[in-house]
Image (cartoon, rainbow, N blue to C red):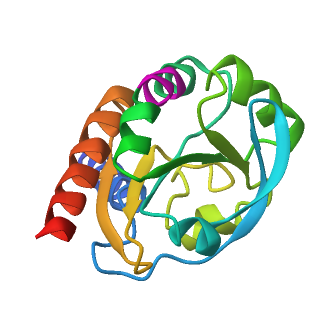
Amino acid sequence: MTLSRVLKTAAALALLCAAQAQAALQVGDAAPAFTTPAAVAGKPFTFDLAATLKKGPVVLYFFPKAFTQGCTLEAHAFAEATPRFAALGATVVGMSHDDIATLQRFSTEACRDQFAVASDPQAQTIRAYDAAAAANPARADRISYVIGQDGKVKFVHIGSDPEAHVAQTRAAVEKLQAAARK
């Protein structure tokens, strides 16, 4: 194989992987319903998306792995912002493939007892939300969704900057709530 052909093949594979990494549900799509083990303040419970949506919009953010640097930074940022989300009537929940025992600790240490984190060890919900990482489909990519009370995706953010997920989902919830008041 010539160097030129190798480079073209590598470029094509890189584009394919980038496209897969950017796959996500679109605004207007129905958010797949799910129930799964979760924890808040170290206490386990069953998180039910449909039941939570009855109370208001949900910010569902996927993260790759508990206790890694970026995921811990993101959890801290969501923890600081959770009172503002709550004031807007929104519930924050993070989700990863980590087991519930790990997330019980993460909910206290990184999430600072402010919001729930949900366990998806078989990556069923991760796949349903097109949130699987291209390099490791069992893990989640860093994707955030705002889901309206009607069960539809209202906002999607994909990116590696953990704090951008918080700022942009909060702005989306503010916009959603402003539209609801009109």
Residue 174 seen by the camera: yes
Left or right relative to 180: residue 140: right
Q: Is residue 80 above or below residue 147?
A: above
At x 41%, y 50%, the residue is 144
Between 133 and 70, the one nearer to me in the picture: 70
Q: Position of residue 91 (x, y in %)?
A: 50, 51
Quadrant location, the C terminus: bottom left
Left or right relative to 39: residue 101: right
Left or right relative to 120: residue 5: left
Marker count (numbered): 0
At x 73%, y 23%, the residue is 108
Q: Quadrant of residue 44?
A: top right
Q: Position of residue 154 (x, y in %)?
A: 29, 68
Q: Residue reaching furthest left?
A: 182
Q: Main secondary structure of the magenta part?
A: helix
Task: Magenta stretch: give its range.
Answer: 75-80
